[in-house]
Amino acid sequence: MVTPENSKETDIETSIIKVDIAIVGAGPAGLAAAREVSATGATAAVLDSYARPGGQYFKQTPQTFRAKRPGRLHHDYAPAQALFGVAEASPRLTLRTNTTVWTAYGSDNGFSLHCYRPGESSLEVRAKKVILAPGAYDRALPFPGWDLPGVMTAGAIQTLAKSQRVLPGRRIVLSGSGPFLLPVAALLAESGANLAGVFEATRPVVMLRYGSAAWNGRAKLGEGAGYLRVLRRYGVPYRFGRAVVRAEGAGRVERVSVTRLNPDWTIMPGSLETLEADTVGVGYGFTPSTDLSQLFGCEHRYEPTQDASFALHDARQQSTKPGVFVAGEICGIGGSAVALPQGAIAGLAAALDLDPSLSSKSEANSRLARFQAEARQAQAFAGTLNRMFALRPGWQSWATPETIICRCEEVTLGKIQTAINEFDLKNVKAVKLTTRCGMGLCQGRVCGQAVSSFTASLTGRDPAETGSFSNRPIVRPVPLGELVQ
Amino acid sequence: MVRLLLANDYFKVSRKDLDDLRIKPSYEAAEIERGEPFEFSFGGQPVMAYPGETVGTALLAAGIATFRTTRQGGQPRGIFCGIGICFDCLVVVEGRLNQRA
């Protein structure tokens, strides 16, 4: 059972809850895990930084907006509703929103997760198993002017329009690569936005190469076709092999430069056109949130097609660290179609490990097999999309020496180039220590992959060798008072 | 300073903000019903907000894109990631520093 109690060790109040399984993230993977855990009779705590469950994919409007038809904002709302229902109804589940895990560790007695809750006492969750389902965030590529107000990620635009019901600006341009641009564009068009253009960097000829493999995911292709119909209905130009490579304006975006791209994404000379816009949405795929899995010491592997490192796991979603399970984007970018079955597998497997005498063990195992088949099929299609829309290295030529790469510490590409040449730096950690890039509040989440890519190409090495920023014992910024406790 | 507006006040404010960036009712697919609006002050400028909105939403809706300037270059920053990752959108809320808007 869930047993809230107060810590006796200190005078300062810290709530402690003890559960069988701690689940980090209340998106599709985390909620699916919670559903399976609670069905086996085990207890779980689901922890999420946001005010309402759902993660990015099932993001809800604020409660105070009293949405009468929330389903209209989602492509596939029924599974979301079912999962929200489980989280609310099960007495064995504790859902804690506005709760950010800032550090965690394992010991012989299990795992301990320390959480920060703004305006509330801190929370420690003790559990026998941990499921990490922290999701991912947009990958933005640096270009001149990408730090001007008005340039934001496609995910930010989706959150503003879908959850907050506000448009990001008066005249919007979207630029990026991958299927995520389409639902964001359709959402804007249907919300009455002035959408001046959607620019997909990948060229159609590359997409055709994967045509037959993509056929396996025809249900998802149908969803994409639906978004394209919306764009056509609203007269929104959707163009391939192009990208926004510069944003300009006094204090905020006023105009952008769009260019045709060569197959390697370098700028095609003489193809520059200028568009007036006050908002640019950029989204070049996603970066997984691996800070907690790094902290737990799970092994990760660099995936060149996605240009990111993902947590390794077995067929039961267990990471290389016993007792730590991983599900969803942290294992490879695949969206909710992969996250839902992977979360379910992790939940079932973690619960089965806890209680080998589980009464319905055979039933649980057959459920496990079914989710595994579902996950494999969804992964195959996700893999095709990831290869189709993979970043081409020419994006590195969009930035000039004056372009800020690390937004927090305001480190320019020129400074990184000079440091690498001058001190003969070989890896990302050395670049960080020399230039301060990645040392700011975002802890390298935004610039990390870019710094890694630039370091690899400037040193002529492989991104797998140049590495990434080191992991830290404190994975999210917290007030000092929280540490004292 | 946050204060609730009376209905009459709201009418005056809404005249001014008629062209704000909130999604217009004719496009409101989810049929949301926002609560009573209130006003807060941002750098001395009055800004209208509805319960449940983030500070960032209210500022953006009022056409304010720059929330702060950077420490070194003094460059403007506003909403970038929108999901609490990048810390570009930091503001001071009632004396509390470094709050994500």
Image (spheres, rainbow, N blue to C red):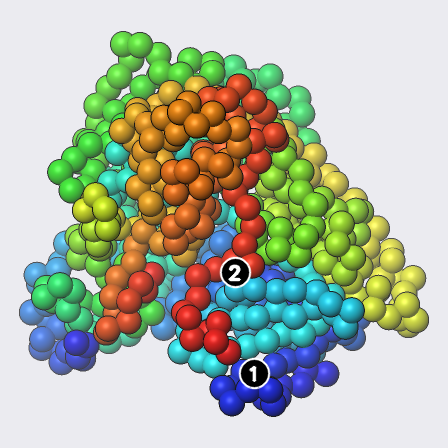
Residue A91 position within the rendered picture, expressed as x and y whole percent measured from the top left: 67, 81
Q: Amino acid at mark 2?
A: Ile
Can residue A169 be seen?
Answer: no
Q: Residue at x 38, y 20 (%)?
A: A397
Number of other residues with Cα within 10 Å of mark 1, as a class: few under 14, some 14 to 19, many 20 or more: some
Residue A143 in the image: above or below residue A171: above
Q: Which residue is mark 1?
A: A15
Q: Is residue B51 left or right of residue A287?
A: left
Q: Amino acid at mark 1?
A: Ser
Residue A139 in the image: above or below residue A259: below
Residue A476 in the image: above or below residue A228: below
- Chain under callout 1: A
Q: Quadrant of the C terminus of chain B?
A: bottom left
Q: Which residue is mark 2?
A: A474
- Chain under callout 2: A
On the same chain, marks 1 and 2? The answer is yes
Label 1–label 2 contact, CB within 8 A: no
Can residue A430 be seen?
Answer: yes
Residue A126 position within the rendered picture, expressed as x and y whole percent measured from the top left: 67, 74
Q: Residue at x 76, y 49 (%)?
A: A320
Residue A153 position within the rendered picture, expressed as x and y whole percent measured from the top left: 38, 43
Q: Residue at x 76, y 60 (%)?
A: A323
For marks 1 and 2, give the one nearer the viewer: 2
**Most extreme residue toward the top, as rendered?**
A270
Task: Name the one closer to the observer, A288 or A449.
Answer: A449
